[in-house]
Image (spheres, coloured by chain):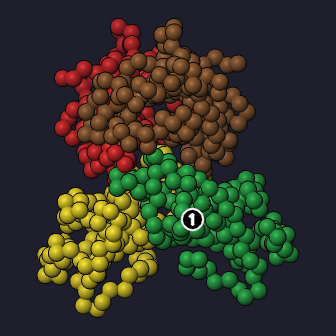
Chain colours: A red, B green, C yellow, D brown
Amino acid sequence: MSFVKKYFQEESDAPAPLIATSRTRVRFEEVDSIGIVWHGRYASYLEDGRMALGDMYGLSYHLFKEHSVAAPIVQMHLDYKKTLRFDEQITIETSLHWVESARLNISYIIRNSAGDIAASAYTVQLLTDFAGGTIFITPLWLEEFRAQWRAGKWSTL
Amino acid sequence: MSFVKKYFQEESDAPAPLIATSRTRVRFEEVDSIGIVWHGRYASYLEDGRMALGDMYGLSYHLFKEHSVAAPIVQMHLDYKKTLRFDEQITIETSLHWVESARLNISYIIRNSAGDIAASAYTVQLLTDFAGGTIFITPLWLEEFRAQWRAGKWSTL
Amino acid sequence: MSFVKKYFQEESDAPAPLIATSRTRVRFEEVDSIGIVWHGRYASYLEDGRMALGDMYGLSYHLFKEHSVAAPIVQMHLDYKKTLRFDEQITIETSLHWVESARLNISYIIRNSAGDIAASAYTVQLLTDFAGGTIFITPLWLEEFRAQWRAGKWSTL
Amino acid sequence: MSFVKKYFQEESDAPAPLIATSRTRVRFEEVDSIGIVWHGRYASYLEDGRMALGDMYGLSYHLFKEHSVAAPIVQMHLDYKKTLRFDEQITIETSLHWVESARLNISYIIRNSAGDIAASAYTVQLLTDFAGGTIFITPLWLEEFRAQWRAGKWSTL
C-alpha cells in the first residue's frame, strides 16, 4: 500500500476514524486545457466525500441546519500525486477523525481508476451560529454523536 | 457590422434598450480540454453583463433584495459563433429591453479580443417573492425606474 | 403528464429519438445564495445527460476523438420551470433526435425528486475537425451509426 | 497589521519575493446558500493572483507553454479567516518566493473590501514536460529569470 500522510495526530485512546467511501466520474468541464482535472475542482470531490460521510453516519448538512449550526471550512489542504483524466471513475475515501473540541477534522484519499492515490487532503471545520459567531462549546447533539462513536456504534462497519 | 439576431420584439413606441458594456478576461479554468471556453461558462459572462447593467442604471441585485423581490431566470438561450481562448480579453454588451410586464428581457453580445461576435444570447427573468411566488403586478419601484427610462433619463448615455 | 416543448421538428419518417435516463444529486456548491441551483449549473446536468447517451448508444466523446472530430455546441437553450434544491436527486432524460445532416440535435428533460419537470432544454452541435473547421459531410462512422438506428437496433430499449 | 503565516522558509540570502497585487469582484455564482463565497472558489482567486504575477514579471502560462513546460500544482493550502460576500471587491496579493530548485513556491493574501485578511494560502508547483514527466533540472530560461531577480531587476517595484 502506498504511503499516505498522517494529517491529524489523534490521542492514543481516540476511537478509530469513521470512514466512508464514495465514487464519482470526472466531468468534461472539470478537465483543463492540459487534459487533466484542474486542481481547483478537487474541492468538489471533497464535498462529495463529506456528503458520503453524512449519508453513512448521519452527520449531514441537514442535521447541522436543523440545529442552526454551520460548519465553515477554516483550512483546506491538498497534496496532488497523480493526474486525473476525463471520464475516469474515481474513489474518495473520507475519514472523520476523533477530536474533543468543537470542530471537525476530516482527511481524504482520492484514488484514480487504477486504484492509485491521485491526491490526499484534509479539511478543518469550526462550528458557528448562522450569524457567523464561533461556537466554542461542542453542542449536546454532537456530544451524543461522539458518545455513540466512542461506544463503538460503527465499529463493525 | 455583423448580423446579430433580434431576440425580442419591442413595441414600436418602446424606448431604446439600456446598454452596458463590460470587459473580462478568460480564466484558465474556463477553458476545456479542446482549448476553448466550455460553453457552460458563458452563463458567468452573462452574469457579469447583468452586474454591469446594475452598476450603470441602478437596477442591481441589491435593489431587488431591498424590496424582497427575486428575479429568477426562466429562460436562457445562447448562440455560439466563434470560440474563445485562455487569457483572451472579451467584451460583453448587455441590453435591457423595454417590456411593460413584470419581467426582465435582456440580450447579450459577447465579442472576442478582435472585436468579432463570439456569442449572442438572451435571458428572461420573472419576478418572485422570496418564497418563490410569482409577482404578476410590476412593483411600484420598478414602474418608477421604467418611467425614468421612458422619460429619457439615460438617453444620452 | 406535463406539457413539454417540442424543440425539434423531425421528418415524419424519422426513427424515434434515442433516449437515455440518468440520475445525479445536487451538489452543495451548485446552490446559490437564494437556496436554489444557480441557472448556469444546468449546463453540467446537460453534460451528464450527453454522457449517459454516449454510454448507452456508444456515441461518446471517445468515439468522436478517435475519429479526430469535435462536436462543439453552437446553440444551447434552457427553460426553467421549477427550482432545484441542495441534495435533491434529479433525473435527466436525454433524447438524440434524428437529423440527416452533420449535426447533433439533443433535447433534455430534468425532473426534480418528486418527478416534476424542473427544466427542459436543447442543444445543437456541429461537427468540426480539431482545428475548428466545420465538417459539412456526415462522416462515414456517424452514417453507420444512423443506419443502425434507422434499422431499429435500439428500438426495443 | 494582522499576523500572516510564513508558509515558506527562504534562505537568508534569498532575494525578496516578487509581489503582484490584483483586484476582483465576487461573482453571484461564487456565493453559497449560507451567503458566503464557497471555500472551493478561492482556487480561482489564486489563479487570478498567478495571472497578475505573470503579467507583472513575465513569468506567464504563455512563456511556459512556449518552452513546452507545464507547472502543475502539487500542493495547495488555504487558511480561511473571514467570510467574503457577494459583490465584494477583493484584493489578492501574490508573492513568488525564491527557491533554487525546479519548482514555484507562491503565497497569497486575500483581503476583503475593508482591507482585512480574508484568507491566506500557498501553492507549490513542480515543472513537467507535456507528457507529465517531472523536470528536475531548472530550465535555462527560468535560471535567467532568476538571475535577473537576484540582480535586482524588480527590486524597485
At a point 23% along the width and 83% down the height, the residue shown is: C15
In the image, is C148 to the left or to the right of D152?
left
Quadrant of the drawing holding the C terminus of chain C: bottom left
User: Quadrant location of residue A146?
Assistant: top left
Query: Label 1 is placed on what type of residue?
Result: Gly
Chain at numbered mark 1 = B
Give the camera-side residue of B72 and C130. Answer: C130
At a point 60% along the width and 40% down the height, the residue shown is: D36
Quadrant of the drawing holding the N terminus of chain C: bottom left
In the image, is A51 to the left or to the right of D84?
left
Pointer 1 residue: B115
Q: Determine whether B58 is above or below D147 in the image.
A: below
Looking at the picture, how far across and down is residue D154, in whole percent?
59, 26
Q: Determine whether B101 is above or below A14 in the image.
A: below
User: Quadrant location of residue C115?
Assistant: bottom left
At a point 60% along the width and 60% down the height, the residue shown is: B91
Residue C60 visible in the current orientation: no
Mark 1 falls on what kind of element? loop
Looking at the picture, how far across and down is residue A120, in whole percent?
34, 28
Give the camera-side residue of D104 and D151. Answer: D151
User: Quadrant location of residue B72?
Assistant: bottom right
Q: Determine whether A118 is above or below B78 in the image.
A: above
